Amino acid sequence: MEGSLTRKGFTTASFCHQMCSYGFFAEQIPACFSSSSFASKYPELDSLVKKPIVTAPVSLSIYKTKTSRRIVSAANPYAFACAAKYMGEHRKQIFQLARSENSESPVTFIHYYNEDEDEVINSELARNARRARSDFRKNLRNRINIAMGYRFRLALDISTFYDSIYTHSVVWAVCGKRDAKKMHFQTGAKKTASYTFADNLDVRMRNQKNQETSGILTGPFTSRIFSEILMAAIDVDLRDRGFNFRRYVDDYKFYFRSEPEAQKAIVDISKVLAEYSLSINQSKIEIAEYPFDLESRMKERLDAALEISVYSALMEAGRLYLEGEKGAYKYALKMLRNREIPDEDFAPVLSMLFNINLLDPRYARYIVSYLEQSKSAMGVQRLAEIINRELDRSLQDGYDQEVLNLLFFLRAINLEIEGSLLLGALDMENDFIDVIALDFWTNRNDLVNKSSNEAHEIDRAVGKIADELRRETVDGEHWLLIYEAKAHSLLDIGEFSGKTADFFAAMLDQGVSFYCPELK
């Protein structure tokens, strides 16, 4: 394991701070939603994090493929802190359980950065913040090494991975299925320390999702850690059956000497996964003949293109994408941060950026800085027209993530929004979208291009939201909207109510906000 959790500097407090900093929001959530102030004020809130409380998450439908979507969620901050604190207190045990010689998952590695003399959880947002390299190339070389003497590779993943995880299975992973069930169901059965630990972890994960045992949240880093404990136990079972493989989260690469051997293995692998209530995604099974696991020339090609221009780099990223390099656009956009675009390239670059966002809305956080530059190069009115047009299309499609990103673009760089589109956004009934839409209406009304009738309809929609929120608690699925409505004076909804109300009141007193409308 690279970078252990036993170094003196990696304490429960630093673990919780990093989890709150980098593990709260999924990377698909636009950058205007941030947990940085939550992390900075966590030491003042820690004493309030005590017994587990059942809560509901706030969720967002996001792009997965051209024909499918998935749900990412942000846990109630109290429930998240409760799980993160428990993980921090038991971090040595957890990361020992999560350790697997077959795993290439980020959870397996804690990165040590000499410049900060600090260990950092290996999440996407942490790597971005620290400008840290991924482990991709090292992992690829390891796979090449273990593939020696094997002609065929079987690639597969788990169907609806996070949604399929049965939370009690973590107790099976830690204690063994038979012993775990005996301790759970048999009256008078003595519960071991391992059982108590795993059961408490199970409770804290369930309390992020209405106490449900079927599925865990997609998005929070607590889910990454929890799932890795389960998958490490499955790795042991697969090794015991003689399989040679590597795994990244739920993506497996198995190596065999013949194709019939690979075909036969699918049945055995399915049986192992079924013991933990998981199944193979049949549509993703692939058997490849050597050569496989080839090292990409993506970085070199994009670096060379960037030496010419931003335009050339994006064109090369498109070529790489068509060749099967699905990460080409993301890598290019991360490379291009803070690079200036010549005036003559703005129109085609902007066109490509919008199309990239339509292709995969996860890239929105990398695009907004270029839109800021476009205000002066193309003109505020023209840019606003383009974004409003795309917003109209996304509203008609009913796509949460796409609508959210386009609202983010408009608000972040202070462009006008059409009143009819703002009303349409409010009608989406999504907390993330509502926060930005209400911010427009309450704090930047001058940017809303509306008729008197549209203004009346927006006021009516806002009033309806306020009425509904007054009947809700911060324990429920609207915790984000309730909290930010008070933090940014978006709505008059009275005091917090619910079992986590004291925690939310304390966050408000400390100046915590999860919504940051201004570009940093």
Image (cartoon, rainbow, N blue to C red):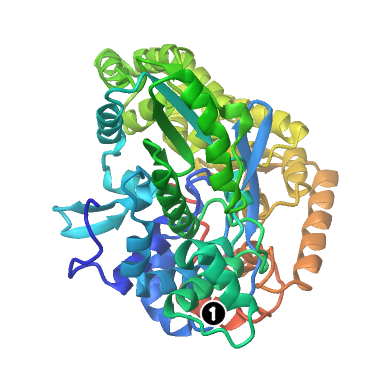
Residue at horizontal 39%, vertical 66%?
39
Q: Residue furthest bottom?
A: 188
Foreground of the two, 4 or 457? 4
Q: Nearer the viewer, residue 418 or 156?
A: 156
Image coordinates for residue 238, horizontal then vertical, percent: 44, 44
- State the residue in front, 440 or 325: 325
Q: Which residue is mark 1?
A: 503
- Circle 1: residue type: Phe
* Residue 442, percent from left and from top: 65, 57
Instruction: Locate residue 216, reporting x and y percent.
Output: 59, 57
Q: Position of residue 345 (x, y in %)?
A: 40, 14
Residue 473 appears left or right of 17 = right
Q: Is residue 415 visible?
A: no
> Considering depth in this image, is 511 or 333 the residue closer to the camera?
333
Element marked by disc 1: helix
Left or right? Give the position of 485 relative to 511.
right
One can see residue 153 in this view: yes
Count up the numbered dots.
1
* Quarter of image, res 57: bottom right
Q: Look at the picture and state if 14 lies above or below 442.
A: below
